[in-house]
Image (cartoon, grey):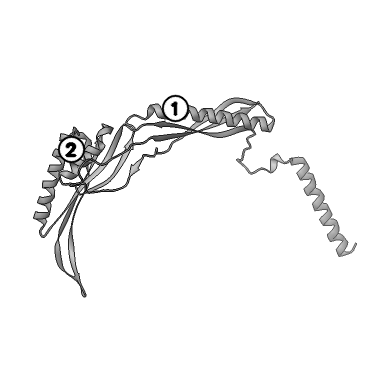
Amino acid sequence: MSRLNKRTSLLLMLFALLAGLLVACGPDSLAPAGSSTTVTGGGITVIGQGEAFGTPDQANIQIGVETFAETVSAATSQNETSVNAILAALAAQGIAKEDIQTSNYSLWAEQIYGDKGPEGIAGYRVTNQVNVTVRNIDKVGDVIAAATEAGANNVGGVYFSVADPAGLEAEARAAAIADAQARAASLASLSGVELGQVISVSEVIGVQPMISYDRVESAAGMGGAPSIEPGQLSYTMQVQLTYAIK
């Protein structure tokens, strides 16, 4: 037998042996060690969204005072005098001490710049800002007016919220469940299948938005409280449901 025929015969024998091994072992024996396969009956997963509206019943206001003087002691003293006057005005408006919290305090030197760079210090600027919670929504404008008349020269913003949003969240959640159920029923009908029991429920947690108003400049001498409208807040909830298929 020629060398070529011997090589061909050897290759044919090897292919035959390999084919026999594949048939004997089957496809399961070829899976990597430690692997597993899970077979499920399938399901339908949907996300429903619900919304509820409510009227704000409280507001947060950023109220601050900024002072400037040639020395640190003068700048801090002037600022402290203004802050004490503002706090007294807030107390007169019925704001509890627990509803006033310092949110920012800073002091820095302002440089004098010339053609060759810094030439000295012009003075010192002090900023003190407090976060005020107003629990009587009808007094927001009066609180701003009282604070600015007492010396506040900037208001960082007005943010409305609901003190206890649990009721609105529950309403929005119920609407989200109903929306998810309707979506699942529609998908099942379109797919020609029948829904089984709910096998998974999860809620998508997110931060609820608040209505906000931009910076309000000093209202000293403005001749009355500013007009502030709280409007409505929207609470949105999302839920994810997974249904089995019968």
Along the line of sight, the residue nearer the viewer: 9 or 238:
238
- What amino acid is found at the position of numbered circle 1 in the picture? Glu
158 sits left or right of 30 in the view: left
The answer to whether residue 37 is above or below residue 216 is above
Q: Mark 1 points at which residue?
A: 171
Label at residue 70: none
Q: Name the residue under label 2.
A: 90
Element class at badge 1: helix
Along the line of sight, the residue nearer the viewer: 223 or 87:
223
Q: Indicate the quadrant containing the N terminus: top left, top right, bottom left or bottom right.
A: bottom right
Query: Whole-percent x and y of residue 66?
Result: 18, 52
The residue under the point 69% across, 41% down is 29
Query: Whole-percent x and y of residue 244?
Result: 61, 28
The residue under the point 74% across, 41% down is 25
Q: Indicate the quadrant containing the C terminus: top left, top right, bottom left or bottom right.
A: top right
- Whether residue 41 is visible here, answered yes or no, is no
106 sits left or right of 228 in the view: left
